[in-house]
Image (cartoon, grey):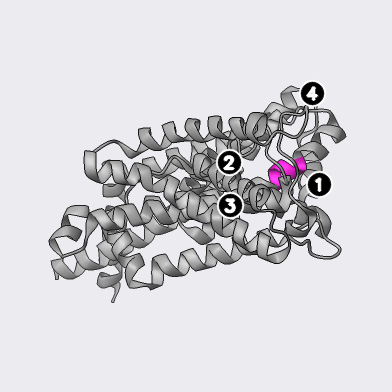
Amino acid sequence: MAKKFDSKGAARGMARERTLTILVPIISVLLALVVGGIVIACLGKNPIQGYALLFSGSLGTPQKFASSLVSACPLIFTALAAAFAYRCGVFNLGGEGQFIMGAVSAIVFLLVTGIEGIAGTVLAILVGTVVGALWAALPGIMKITRGLNEMITSIMLNYVATLFMGFIYTNAFRDGGNPQTPSVADSVMLAKIPGFRIHTGVILAIVLGLVVAYVISKTSFGFKIRAVGLNPLASKVNGFNVKFLVVAAFVISGAIAGMGGAVELLGKQHRLMSGFGSGFGFDGVAIALIAQLNPLASLLVAIFFGALTTGASSMQVGIMVPTAIVEIIRALIIIFSVAGVALIKLPKIQALIQQMGSGKAKKEEVNA
Protein backbone atom coordinates (compact mmCIF):
# COMPACT_ATOMS: atom_id res chain seq x y z
CA MET A 1 0.00 0.00 0.00
CA ALA A 2 2.82 2.38 0.86
CA LYS A 3 4.44 1.70 -2.49
CA LYS A 4 1.13 2.47 -4.19
CA PHE A 5 0.94 5.78 -2.34
CA ASP A 6 4.54 6.53 -3.30
CA SER A 7 4.00 5.81 -7.00
CA LYS A 8 0.88 7.93 -7.13
CA GLY A 9 2.58 10.69 -5.20
CA ALA A 10 5.61 10.61 -7.48
CA ALA A 11 3.41 10.79 -10.56
CA ARG A 12 1.46 13.72 -9.16
CA GLY A 13 4.67 15.41 -8.11
CA MET A 14 6.05 15.11 -11.63
CA ALA A 15 2.82 16.46 -13.07
CA ARG A 16 2.94 19.43 -10.71
CA GLU A 17 6.56 20.10 -11.63
CA ARG A 18 5.73 20.05 -15.34
CA THR A 19 2.84 22.43 -14.74
CA LEU A 20 5.05 24.81 -12.77
CA THR A 21 7.72 24.63 -15.48
CA ILE A 22 5.14 25.65 -18.09
CA LEU A 23 3.80 28.45 -15.90
CA VAL A 24 7.22 29.95 -15.14
CA PRO A 25 7.68 31.68 -18.55
CA ILE A 26 4.10 32.99 -18.48
CA ILE A 27 4.46 34.37 -14.97
CA SER A 28 7.87 35.79 -15.91
CA VAL A 29 6.35 37.73 -18.81
CA LEU A 30 3.59 39.11 -16.60
CA LEU A 31 6.02 40.13 -13.86
CA ALA A 32 8.34 41.77 -16.39
CA LEU A 33 5.43 43.74 -17.84
CA VAL A 34 4.40 44.85 -14.35
CA VAL A 35 7.92 46.03 -13.51
CA GLY A 36 8.20 47.67 -16.92
CA GLY A 37 4.91 49.44 -16.25
CA ILE A 38 6.27 50.74 -12.96
CA VAL A 39 9.34 52.08 -14.76
CA ILE A 40 7.12 53.80 -17.35
CA ALA A 41 4.98 55.29 -14.55
CA CYS A 42 8.12 56.59 -12.83
CA LEU A 43 8.91 58.44 -16.06
CA GLY A 44 5.56 60.22 -15.73
CA LYS A 45 3.85 58.31 -18.53
CA ASN A 46 0.78 56.08 -18.67
CA PRO A 47 1.90 52.42 -18.76
CA ILE A 48 -1.48 51.16 -19.99
CA GLN A 49 -1.36 53.55 -22.92
CA GLY A 50 2.26 52.60 -23.52
CA TYR A 51 1.52 48.87 -23.67
CA ALA A 52 -1.50 49.50 -25.88
CA LEU A 53 0.78 51.32 -28.33
CA LEU A 54 3.45 48.63 -28.00
CA PHE A 55 1.17 45.74 -28.94
CA SER A 56 -0.95 47.64 -31.46
CA GLY A 57 2.28 48.69 -33.18
CA SER A 58 3.43 45.07 -33.45
CA LEU A 59 0.22 43.04 -33.66
CA GLY A 60 -2.48 45.56 -34.54
CA THR A 61 -2.72 44.77 -38.26
CA PRO A 62 -1.63 41.86 -40.45
CA GLN A 63 1.15 44.04 -41.89
CA LYS A 64 2.46 44.92 -38.43
CA PHE A 65 2.30 41.30 -37.37
CA ALA A 66 4.27 40.43 -40.51
CA SER A 67 6.92 42.97 -39.47
CA SER A 68 7.09 41.30 -36.06
CA LEU A 69 7.64 37.94 -37.74
CA VAL A 70 10.47 39.40 -39.81
CA SER A 71 12.08 40.76 -36.62
CA ALA A 72 11.64 37.36 -34.98
CA CYS A 73 13.08 35.38 -37.90
CA PRO A 74 16.80 35.51 -36.93
CA LEU A 75 15.86 34.89 -33.30
CA ILE A 76 14.00 31.72 -34.29
CA PHE A 77 17.09 30.33 -36.00
CA THR A 78 19.50 31.12 -33.17
CA ALA A 79 17.03 29.90 -30.52
CA LEU A 80 16.56 26.59 -32.33
CA ALA A 81 20.34 26.27 -32.67
CA ALA A 82 20.86 26.80 -28.94
CA ALA A 83 17.98 24.50 -27.96
CA PHE A 84 19.21 21.62 -30.11
CA ALA A 85 22.73 21.75 -28.70
CA TYR A 86 21.51 22.09 -25.12
CA ARG A 87 19.30 19.02 -25.47
CA CYS A 88 22.53 17.07 -25.98
CA GLY A 89 24.01 18.60 -22.84
CA VAL A 90 26.49 20.87 -24.64
CA PHE A 91 26.47 24.65 -24.43
CA ASN A 92 26.79 26.26 -27.83
CA LEU A 93 27.27 29.95 -27.07
CA GLY A 94 28.69 30.53 -30.54
CA GLY A 95 25.38 30.93 -32.34
CA GLU A 96 26.18 34.54 -33.18
CA GLY A 97 29.49 33.62 -34.81
CA GLN A 98 27.88 30.79 -36.75
CA PHE A 99 25.07 33.13 -37.81
CA ILE A 100 27.61 35.70 -39.02
CA MET A 101 29.74 33.13 -40.85
CA GLY A 102 26.64 31.83 -42.62
CA ALA A 103 25.89 35.33 -43.90
CA VAL A 104 29.54 36.06 -44.78
CA SER A 105 29.97 32.86 -46.75
CA ALA A 106 26.64 33.39 -48.54
CA ILE A 107 27.46 36.90 -49.76
CA VAL A 108 31.06 36.03 -50.66
CA PHE A 109 29.76 33.08 -52.69
CA LEU A 110 27.30 35.30 -54.54
CA LEU A 111 29.77 38.13 -55.18
CA VAL A 112 32.52 35.79 -56.39
CA THR A 113 30.42 33.51 -58.58
CA GLY A 114 27.88 36.06 -59.78
CA ILE A 115 25.12 33.44 -59.74
CA GLU A 116 21.65 34.96 -59.76
CA GLY A 117 18.04 33.79 -59.65
CA ILE A 118 16.56 30.96 -57.63
CA ALA A 119 19.71 28.87 -58.08
CA GLY A 120 21.77 31.63 -56.46
CA THR A 121 19.33 31.88 -53.55
CA VAL A 122 19.28 28.15 -52.87
CA LEU A 123 23.04 27.74 -53.23
CA ALA A 124 23.78 30.77 -51.02
CA ILE A 125 21.57 29.39 -48.23
CA LEU A 126 23.18 25.96 -48.65
CA VAL A 127 26.69 27.45 -48.47
CA GLY A 128 25.75 29.45 -45.35
CA THR A 129 24.33 26.32 -43.74
CA VAL A 130 27.44 24.25 -44.44
CA VAL A 131 29.87 26.94 -43.26
CA GLY A 132 27.82 27.49 -40.08
CA ALA A 133 28.00 23.74 -39.42
CA LEU A 134 31.77 23.67 -39.95
CA TRP A 135 32.26 26.72 -37.71
CA ALA A 136 30.27 25.02 -34.94
CA ALA A 137 32.17 21.77 -35.38
CA LEU A 138 35.37 23.46 -34.14
CA PRO A 139 34.36 23.77 -30.45
CA GLY A 140 32.78 20.32 -30.63
CA ILE A 141 35.99 18.73 -31.89
CA MET A 142 38.09 20.65 -29.35
CA LYS A 143 35.78 19.41 -26.60
CA ILE A 144 35.97 15.70 -27.42
CA THR A 145 39.67 15.65 -28.37
CA ARG A 146 41.27 18.08 -25.92
CA GLY A 147 38.58 18.44 -23.25
CA LEU A 148 38.31 22.20 -23.80
CA ASN A 149 35.28 23.99 -22.39
CA GLU A 150 32.86 24.52 -25.28
CA MET A 151 31.38 27.66 -23.74
CA ILE A 152 34.75 29.45 -23.83
CA THR A 153 35.81 28.23 -27.27
CA SER A 154 32.44 28.96 -28.89
CA ILE A 155 32.33 32.48 -27.40
CA MET A 156 35.87 33.21 -28.59
CA LEU A 157 34.94 32.08 -32.09
CA ASN A 158 32.19 34.72 -32.05
CA TYR A 159 34.89 37.41 -31.92
CA VAL A 160 36.83 35.73 -34.71
CA ALA A 161 33.72 35.65 -36.91
CA THR A 162 32.92 39.30 -36.18
CA LEU A 163 36.46 40.42 -37.00
CA PHE A 164 36.49 38.35 -40.17
CA MET A 165 33.19 39.93 -41.22
CA GLY A 166 34.76 43.34 -40.60
CA PHE A 167 37.59 42.45 -42.97
CA ILE A 168 35.07 41.42 -45.61
CA TYR A 169 33.00 44.63 -45.59
CA THR A 170 35.86 47.07 -44.98
CA ASN A 171 38.52 45.57 -47.25
CA ALA A 172 37.93 42.52 -49.39
CA PHE A 173 34.44 43.40 -50.71
CA ARG A 174 34.03 47.03 -49.71
CA ASP A 175 31.40 49.00 -51.63
CA GLY A 176 33.25 52.18 -52.59
CA GLY A 177 33.78 54.59 -49.72
CA ASN A 178 31.17 53.01 -47.49
CA PRO A 179 32.22 50.38 -44.94
CA GLN A 180 29.78 47.80 -46.28
CA THR A 181 29.57 45.18 -49.00
CA PRO A 182 27.60 45.67 -52.21
CA SER A 183 23.98 44.58 -52.02
CA VAL A 184 23.09 41.15 -53.31
CA ALA A 185 21.29 41.07 -56.65
CA ASP A 186 17.54 41.56 -56.59
CA SER A 187 17.02 38.17 -58.22
CA VAL A 188 18.58 36.30 -55.27
CA MET A 189 16.68 38.16 -52.55
CA LEU A 190 14.07 36.05 -50.80
CA ALA A 191 10.63 36.64 -52.27
CA LYS A 192 8.08 38.58 -50.24
CA ILE A 193 4.50 37.48 -49.76
CA PRO A 194 2.25 39.85 -51.76
CA GLY A 195 0.54 42.45 -49.55
CA PHE A 196 2.81 41.80 -46.57
CA ARG A 197 6.30 42.87 -45.54
CA ILE A 198 7.32 39.30 -44.91
CA HIS A 199 9.87 37.23 -46.81
CA THR A 200 9.79 33.50 -47.37
CA GLY A 201 12.65 33.00 -44.92
CA VAL A 202 10.14 33.44 -42.10
CA ILE A 203 8.17 30.46 -43.40
CA LEU A 204 11.42 28.49 -43.65
CA ALA A 205 12.21 29.33 -40.01
CA ILE A 206 8.79 28.17 -38.79
CA VAL A 207 8.96 24.95 -40.81
CA LEU A 208 12.46 24.32 -39.49
CA GLY A 209 11.15 24.72 -35.94
CA LEU A 210 8.56 22.01 -36.61
CA VAL A 211 11.22 19.74 -38.13
CA VAL A 212 13.57 20.21 -35.17
CA ALA A 213 10.74 19.45 -32.74
CA TYR A 214 9.91 16.26 -34.64
CA VAL A 215 13.54 15.12 -34.82
CA ILE A 216 14.12 15.67 -31.11
CA SER A 217 10.93 14.06 -29.86
CA LYS A 218 9.98 11.45 -32.47
CA THR A 219 13.17 9.96 -33.94
CA SER A 220 15.75 7.51 -32.61
CA PHE A 221 18.49 10.05 -33.30
CA GLY A 222 16.63 12.60 -31.21
CA PHE A 223 16.25 10.04 -28.43
CA LYS A 224 20.02 9.49 -28.43
CA ILE A 225 20.62 13.23 -28.32
CA ARG A 226 18.29 13.60 -25.33
CA ALA A 227 19.80 10.58 -23.61
CA VAL A 228 23.31 12.01 -23.87
CA GLY A 229 22.02 15.31 -22.54
CA LEU A 230 20.46 13.62 -19.52
CA ASN A 231 23.30 11.21 -18.70
CA PRO A 232 26.31 10.83 -21.00
CA LEU A 233 27.87 8.08 -18.86
CA ALA A 234 24.74 5.92 -18.94
CA SER A 235 24.42 6.57 -22.68
CA LYS A 236 27.97 5.37 -23.22
CA VAL A 237 27.35 2.24 -21.15
CA ASN A 238 24.30 1.50 -23.33
CA GLY A 239 26.41 1.64 -26.48
CA PHE A 240 25.78 5.17 -27.71
CA ASN A 241 28.68 6.89 -29.45
CA VAL A 242 28.69 9.90 -27.13
CA LYS A 243 31.58 11.75 -28.82
CA PHE A 244 29.96 11.45 -32.23
CA LEU A 245 26.61 12.66 -30.89
CA VAL A 246 28.25 15.66 -29.19
CA VAL A 247 29.93 16.74 -32.43
CA ALA A 248 26.73 16.01 -34.37
CA ALA A 249 24.76 18.25 -32.00
CA PHE A 250 27.26 21.06 -32.56
CA VAL A 251 27.22 20.57 -36.34
CA ILE A 252 23.42 20.59 -36.58
CA SER A 253 23.20 23.54 -34.21
CA GLY A 254 25.71 25.49 -36.29
CA ALA A 255 23.94 24.55 -39.52
CA ILE A 256 20.70 26.03 -38.17
CA ALA A 257 22.44 29.25 -37.11
CA GLY A 258 24.36 29.49 -40.40
CA MET A 259 21.15 29.06 -42.35
CA GLY A 260 19.65 31.85 -40.27
CA GLY A 261 22.52 34.17 -41.20
CA ALA A 262 22.07 33.47 -44.91
CA VAL A 263 18.30 33.95 -44.66
CA GLU A 264 18.69 37.25 -42.80
CA LEU A 265 21.12 38.45 -45.47
CA LEU A 266 18.93 37.50 -48.41
CA GLY A 267 15.61 38.35 -46.81
CA LYS A 268 16.19 41.60 -44.94
CA GLN A 269 19.70 43.10 -44.73
CA HIS A 270 20.92 42.32 -48.30
CA ARG A 271 24.48 43.44 -47.44
CA LEU A 272 27.05 43.15 -44.66
CA MET A 273 27.87 46.16 -42.52
CA SER A 274 28.82 47.03 -38.97
CA GLY A 275 26.44 45.50 -36.43
CA PHE A 276 25.12 42.72 -38.66
CA GLY A 277 24.00 39.82 -36.48
CA SER A 278 24.88 41.62 -33.25
CA GLY A 279 23.04 40.20 -30.25
CA PHE A 280 21.10 37.53 -32.12
CA GLY A 281 23.20 34.68 -30.73
CA PHE A 282 22.84 35.51 -27.05
CA ASP A 283 19.18 36.48 -27.50
CA GLY A 284 18.67 33.05 -29.04
CA VAL A 285 20.25 31.38 -26.00
CA ALA A 286 17.98 33.38 -23.71
CA ILE A 287 14.90 32.47 -25.75
CA ALA A 288 15.84 28.78 -25.68
CA LEU A 289 16.20 28.88 -21.89
CA ILE A 290 12.89 30.69 -21.44
CA ALA A 291 11.25 28.07 -23.66
CA GLN A 292 12.72 25.25 -21.55
CA LEU A 293 14.65 24.02 -24.62
CA ASN A 294 11.38 23.21 -26.40
CA PRO A 295 11.62 24.04 -30.14
CA LEU A 296 7.92 24.86 -30.49
CA ALA A 297 7.96 27.06 -27.40
CA SER A 298 11.12 28.70 -28.77
CA LEU A 299 9.12 29.72 -31.84
CA LEU A 300 6.50 31.42 -29.69
CA VAL A 301 8.99 33.19 -27.44
CA ALA A 302 11.00 34.39 -30.44
CA ILE A 303 7.86 35.81 -32.05
CA PHE A 304 6.99 37.56 -28.77
CA PHE A 305 10.48 39.08 -28.62
CA GLY A 306 10.12 40.14 -32.25
CA ALA A 307 6.82 41.81 -31.42
CA LEU A 308 8.45 43.73 -28.57
CA THR A 309 11.18 44.95 -30.94
CA THR A 310 8.69 46.01 -33.61
CA GLY A 311 6.31 47.77 -31.22
CA ALA A 312 9.01 49.65 -29.31
CA SER A 313 9.11 52.51 -31.82
CA SER A 314 5.32 52.96 -31.66
CA MET A 315 5.49 53.27 -27.88
CA GLN A 316 8.39 55.69 -28.13
CA VAL A 317 6.54 57.95 -30.57
CA GLY A 318 3.20 57.68 -28.76
CA ILE A 319 4.18 58.47 -25.17
CA MET A 320 7.78 59.65 -25.62
CA VAL A 321 9.60 56.95 -23.66
CA PRO A 322 12.94 55.47 -24.78
CA THR A 323 12.95 52.14 -26.59
CA ALA A 324 15.35 50.96 -23.86
CA ILE A 325 12.22 50.20 -21.82
CA VAL A 326 11.61 47.22 -24.10
CA GLU A 327 15.18 46.02 -23.53
CA ILE A 328 14.54 46.24 -19.78
CA ILE A 329 11.39 44.15 -20.16
CA ARG A 330 13.20 41.54 -22.25
CA ALA A 331 16.03 41.35 -19.70
CA LEU A 332 13.54 40.97 -16.84
CA ILE A 333 11.76 38.13 -18.65
CA ILE A 334 15.07 36.30 -18.95
CA ILE A 335 16.00 36.92 -15.31
CA PHE A 336 12.61 35.87 -13.93
CA SER A 337 12.46 32.75 -16.15
CA VAL A 338 15.91 31.50 -15.24
CA ALA A 339 15.36 32.28 -11.56
CA GLY A 340 11.97 30.54 -11.62
CA VAL A 341 13.36 27.36 -13.14
CA ALA A 342 16.27 27.38 -10.68
CA LEU A 343 13.81 27.81 -7.82
CA ILE A 344 11.76 24.81 -8.92
CA LYS A 345 14.92 22.67 -9.03
CA LEU A 346 15.89 23.47 -5.43
CA PRO A 347 15.83 20.32 -3.23
CA LYS A 348 13.44 21.88 -0.71
CA ILE A 349 10.99 22.89 -3.44
CA GLN A 350 11.26 19.44 -5.04
CA ALA A 351 10.54 17.80 -1.69
CA LEU A 352 7.54 20.10 -1.16
CA ILE A 353 6.16 19.24 -4.61
CA GLN A 354 6.54 15.51 -3.94
CA GLN A 355 5.00 15.89 -0.51
CA MET A 356 1.97 17.69 -1.95
CA GLY A 357 1.56 14.97 -4.56
CA SER A 358 1.85 12.17 -1.98
CA GLY A 359 -0.62 13.89 0.34
CA LYS A 360 -3.23 14.25 -2.36
CA ALA A 361 -2.77 10.65 -3.55
CA LYS A 362 -3.17 9.36 0.02
CA LYS A 363 -6.30 11.44 0.55
CA GLU A 364 -7.88 10.06 -2.63
CA GLU A 365 -7.01 6.50 -1.60
CA VAL A 366 -8.66 7.00 1.81
CA ASN A 367 -11.78 8.51 0.25
CA ALA A 368 -12.01 5.60 -2.15
Q: Pointer 1: residues within 10 angstroms few (<14), some, or many (20+)?
A: many
Helix, strand or loop at label 3? It is: helix
Alpha carbon of mark 4 to alpha carbon of mark 1: how far? 21 Å
Q: Look at the numbered discs 1 and 2 and tell me whether their residues touch, using CB distance below 8 Å.
A: no
Specify the label residue 44 is tagged with.
Answer: 4
Reply above or below: 166 against 127: above
Alpha carbon of mark 1 to alpha carbon of mark 2: how far? 22 Å
- Upstream in sequence: badge 1 or badge 3: 1
- Magenta stretch: dominant secondary structure: helix
| 329 sits to left or right of 235 | right
Helix, strand or loop at label 4? It is: loop
Of residues 32 and 282, the one drawn nearer to the viewer in this rendering? 282
Reply above or below: 123 against 1: above
| Total marks in image | 4
Specify the label residue 260 is tagged with.
Answer: 3
Specify the label residue 57 is tagged with.
Answer: 1
- Upstream in sequence: badge 1 or badge 2: 1
Specify the label residue 280 is tagged with.
Answer: 2
The percent position of residue 69, horizontal first and vertical second, equals 70, 54
Alpha carbon of mark 1 to alpha carbon of mark 3: how far? 25 Å
Residue flagged by tag 1: what amino acid is it?
A: Gly
Residue flagged by tag 2: what amino acid is it?
A: Phe
Q: Name which quarter of the figure residue 219 lies in.
A: bottom left
Seen as rendered, the residue at the extreme top is 43
Q: Look at the numbered discs 2 and 3 and tell me whether their residues touch, using CB distance below 8 Å.
A: yes
User: Looking at the rendering, in which quadrant would you find the N terminus?
Assistant: bottom left
